């Protein structure tokens, strides 16, 4: 059983992890630094360093090389072997007490089989920020005590072939507790990492994981009721749909196993872009069509999105109404003047109609009736 919090082994692991997580500021760029019981810290220039330095004392406990041009780590590179591997001390033990080895930003492209042979006490190894393109299947074969391995931003250039070899290289690390694989464009979790019985933390942030399949989720669980490793999963392009249901259900049951679970956000489909994964309802996730499982094209039920559209439309209408009322208020004087002018015009028109009506109703102004046809007009002087 892996040691848990409060036990000496776990505390020692935390100390080693904290030491490796600190920046390389104590060791200047293009230098190598080492420390031990007698010498707390000693730095030397490593600008032209093309192989591990040979002047590190045998009692050194930690060694940091930053900004060198090592390019290739050959077999037994830290055990005294020369560049061709045929030195007098090749394969020997030159640094028997070395616990921590940091080799960041050293342009390392190839790590051959047995590159770390001769380091029996090594518990922490950091190869981050190196453009690895080839890794020997037996590169870590001599590191039986290794508990922390950092390969962050180191496997991008190697492609699928390097990831396949990584499974083989991790197999002998039975005591490994911490594994850092951040920033390596991984599309799946390395199966060998899930088989490490004592692994306590797996860092796969900033990769290309669209989700975790049922096999990977089963690999994160342990037999016998033991909890599996903690998983750092943030900053991956997760697809939130029917394929995300197993992962969502697993997160709800093991949220404490994923410290950054609240930072997990959807990158697809577009309707769920940047939505927190834990805020989704697994029962409402559905595939966009029957072929979505094969293509990874998923979507959530349209109900909540439609409701949001109605709310947005209502807000737009309210805004338009508010603007209209504001325009009316700002032009109230002009509107009052216009209404007054309109009323005066209507009154003048009505007075004109009333005057003509009165003229037409006066009997004195009525026209004389016409004489009947055939009658003869007589004058006043006529005797008739």
Image (cartoon, grey):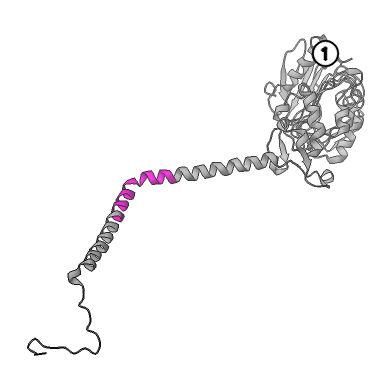
In the picture of the structure, the residue carrying the numbered disc 1 is 4
The residue segment tinted magenta is 324-342
| 46 and 158: which is toward the camera | 158
- By secondary structure, the bulk of the magenta-drawn segment is best described as helix
Residue 236, given in percent of the width and then of the height, sits at 74, 35
Q: Secondary structure at mark 1?
A: loop
| 215 and 324: which is toward the camera | 324
Image vertical order of residue 365 relative to residue 271, above or below: below
Instruction: Check the image and name the residue furthest to the front.
Output: 384
- Is residue 112 something one can see in this rendering? no
Q: Quadrant of residue 216?
A: top right
Q: Quadrant of residue 207?
A: top right
| 24 and 277: which is toward the camera | 277
Answer few, some or many: residues within 10 Å of disc 1's Cα (few below 14, many 20 plus, some between 14 and 19): few
Q: Quadrant of residue 180?
A: top right
| 73 and 289: which is toward the camera | 289
Residue 93, given in percent of the width and then of the height, sits at 90, 19
Q: Is residue 33 left or right of residue 169?
A: left
As for residue 335 lying within the magenta part, the answer is: yes
Question: In the image, what residue occupies the spot 25% across and 87% down?
Answer: 373
- Is residue 276 something one can see in this rendering? yes
Image vertical order of residue 10 relative to residue 85, above or below: above
Residue 195, given in percent of the width and then of the height, sits at 90, 26
Pick the quarter of the image with the N terminus. Answer: top right
Residue 197, given in percent of the width and then of the height, sits at 90, 21
Pick the quarter of the image with the C terminus. Answer: bottom left
As for residue 116 lying within the magenta part, the answer is: no
């Amino acid at each position: 059983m892996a040691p848990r919090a409060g036990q000496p082994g776990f505390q020692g692991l935390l100390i080693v992890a904290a030491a490796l997580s600190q920046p390389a500021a104590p060791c200047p760029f293009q230098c190598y630094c080492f420390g031990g019981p007698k010498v707390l810290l000693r730095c030397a220039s490593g600008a032209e360093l093309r192989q591990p330095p040979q002047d590190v004392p045998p009692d050194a406990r930690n060694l940091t090389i930053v900004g060198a041009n090592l390019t290739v780590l050959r077999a037994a590179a830290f055990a005294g072997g020369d560049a061709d591997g045929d030195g007098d001390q090749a394969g020997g033990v030159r640094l028997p007490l070395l616990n921590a080895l940091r080799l960041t930003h050293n342009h390392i492209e190839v790590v051959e089989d047995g590159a770390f042979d001769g380091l029996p006490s090594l518990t922490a190894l950091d190869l981050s920020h190196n453009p690895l393109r080839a890794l020997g299947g037996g590169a870590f074969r001599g590191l039986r005590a290794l508990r922390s391995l950092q390969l962050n931003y180191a496997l991008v250039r190697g492609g699928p072939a390097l990831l396949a070899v990584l499974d083989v290289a991790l197999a002998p690390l039975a005591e490994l507790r911490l594994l850092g694989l951040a920033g390596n464009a991984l599309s799946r979790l390395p199966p060998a990492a899930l088989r490490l019985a004592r692994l306590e933390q797996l860092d796969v942030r900033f990769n290309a994981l669209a989700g975790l399949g049922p096999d990977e989720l089963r690999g994160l669980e342990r037999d016998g009721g033991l909890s599996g490793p903690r998983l750092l999963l943030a900053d991956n392009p997760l697809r939130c749909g029917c394929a995300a249901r197993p992962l969502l259900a697993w997160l709800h049951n093991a949220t404490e196993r994923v410290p950054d679970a609240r930072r997990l956000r959807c990158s697809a489909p577009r309707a769920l872009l940047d939505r927190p994964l834990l805020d989704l309802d697994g029962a409402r996730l559905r595939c966009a069509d029957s072929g979505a499982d094969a293509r990874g094209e998923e979507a959530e039920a349209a109900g909540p999105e439609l409701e949001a559209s109605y709310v947005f439309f209502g807000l737009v209408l309210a805004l338009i109404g508010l603007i209209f009322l504001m325009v009316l208020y700002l032009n109230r004087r002009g509107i009052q003047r216009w209404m007054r002018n309109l009323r005066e015009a209507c009154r003048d028109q009505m007075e004109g109609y009333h005057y003509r009506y009165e003229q037409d109703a006066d009997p004195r102004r009525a026209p004389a009736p016409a004489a009947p046809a055939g009658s003869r007009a007589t004058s006043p002087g006529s005797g008739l």
